[in-house]
Image (cartoon, helix red, strand yellow):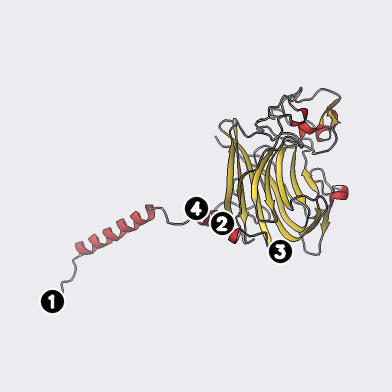
């Protein structure tokens, strides 16, 4: 039997079928885990910062950006790299890589004319070397914002808040700000929304309504390393903590993204929302229910704060590519 040669019309039908099938396949969601598909999408799209690190969310139009300077061991108008006996930033022989040892807290402060930190994407890369026994804290790192200093003093002079520098006009601030002249409760300016990244591999969130009785319980804890393992030694790990308001500034949304292999592949590992009801473990919250703050034990922290922090707890590590950027809130 002779084979029939397809007519041009037949070829057109075949081509049309192939095209339609391809379109149908493209419209179907891929059967991958949420984590892997998200990681691949983030690695391949979006802009990068001056270090070449992927931005998860773009900087808001005209928004403030801060990047770890090349001489990060030196104090500047925004960067405070010396926390006394707790620890300091030390230059290494590797360009733009610095060493930190101990339990220091390094703030990125707000000089005159700079926006205060509210909706932010905070980024850092950490190379874990060793655990120490200085403060007997759970070893690891924290990144947080929406407040100011964390001190054991009961009071501070209100004129010293952010070194006496007021925020730009229209900034959403602590309840009661600007504070009356004289002494105020120091525990109440230490408000913060925190992302934790522990040496044992745990990643989680906390809210701090006051320092220290105003801590909440942890939320959304995960262990993203393979086999629920700990942070590998001598390997770079990237961490991003995202804090942004939602629901017309009536709620707070938080995310933690990680580059587990240090290769630029970012994946969202956990998230949470504070819509009210995230309560401090101590209802007294260090007396911050009183004037001028009038906080509640379930206080929503939706305002801007002058300082963003990189905190280290009982670790020896190297750091690079730290940044803080203003991003847009959610609707």
At a point 68% along the width and 34% down the height, the residue shown is 280
Separation of marks 3 and 2 at Cα, in angstroms: 24 Å
Q: Position of residue 126 (x, y in %)?
A: 71, 57
Closest to the camera, between mark 3 and mark 1, is 3
Outermost bottom residue: 1
Q: Which circle marks residue 2 in the picture?
A: 1
- In front: label 2 or label 1: 2
Choose the circle earlier in sequence order: 1 or 4.
1
Residue ID at (66%, 40%)? 217
Mark 1: few/some/many CA within 10 Å (<14, 14-19, 20+): few
| Secondary element at image label 3 | loop
Q: Residues within 10 Å of mark 4 (few under 14, many from 20)?
A: few
**Disc number lying in front (3 or 2):** 3
The first of marks 2 and 1 along the sequence is 1
Instruction: Please identify the quarter of the rendering in which residue 200 is found.
Output: bottom right
Q: Nearer the viewer, residue 30 or 6?
A: 30
Give the structural element (helix, strand or loop) at label 2. helix
Q: Check residue 288 in the rendering and tell me which mark sits there, or answer none.
A: none
Q: Nearer the viewer, residue 174 or 295?
A: 295
Q: Secondary structure at mark 4?
A: helix
**Tags 3 and 1 touching, CB below 8 Å:** no
Q: CA distance from mark 1 to mark 4?
A: 53 Å
Local SS, label 1: loop
Q: Which mark is residue 233?
A: 3
Disc 4 versus disc 2: nearer the observer:
4
Q: Which residue is mark 2?
A: 43
Q: How far across and how far down the image is residue 41, in percent?
A: 52, 54
Which of labels 1 and 4 is toward the front? 4
Distance from label 3 to label 1 (Cα)? 71 Å
């Amino acid at each position: 039997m002779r084979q029939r040669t397809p007519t041009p019309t037949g070829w057109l039908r075949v081509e049309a079928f192939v095209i339609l099938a391809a379109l149908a396949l493209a419209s179907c969601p891929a059967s991958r885990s949420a984590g892997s598909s998200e990681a691949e999408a983030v690695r391949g799209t979006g802009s990068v910062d001056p270090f070449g690190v992927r931005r998860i969310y773009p900087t808001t139009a005209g928004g403030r950006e801060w990047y770890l300077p090349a001489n990060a061991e030196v104090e500047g108008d925004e960067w405070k790299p010396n926390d006394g006996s707790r620890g300091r930033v030390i230059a290494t022989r590797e360009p733009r890589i610095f060493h930190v040892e101990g339990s220091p807290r390094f703030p990125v402060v707000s000089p005159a004319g700079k926006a205060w930190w509210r909706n932010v994407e905070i980024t850092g890369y950490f190379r874990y070397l060793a655990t120490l026994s200085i403060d007997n804290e759970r070893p690891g790192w924290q990144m947080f914002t929406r407040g100011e200093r964390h001190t054991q003093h009961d009071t501070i002079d209100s004129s010293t808040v952010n070194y006496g520098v007021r925020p730009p006009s229209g900034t959403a601030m602590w309840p009661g700000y600007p504070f009356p002249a004289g002494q105020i409760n120091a525990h109440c300016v230490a408000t913060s929304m925190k992302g934790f990244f522990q040496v044992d591999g745990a990643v989680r969130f906390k809210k701090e309504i006051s320092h220290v009785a105003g801590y909440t319980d942890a939320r959304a804890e995960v262990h993203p390393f393979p086999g629920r393992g700990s942070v590998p030694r001598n390997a770079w790990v990237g961490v991003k903590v995202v804090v942004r308001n939602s629901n017309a500034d009536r709620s707070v949304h938080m995310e933690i993204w990680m580059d587990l292999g240090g290769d630029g592949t970012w994946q969202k590992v956990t998230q949470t929302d504070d819509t009210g009801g995230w309560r401090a473990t101590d209802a007294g919250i260090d007396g911050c229910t009183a004037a001028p703050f009038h906080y509640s034990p379930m206080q929503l922290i939706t305002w801007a704060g002058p300082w963003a922090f990189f905190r280290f707890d009982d670790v020896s590590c190297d750091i690079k590519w730290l940044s803080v950027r203003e991003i847009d809130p959610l609707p």
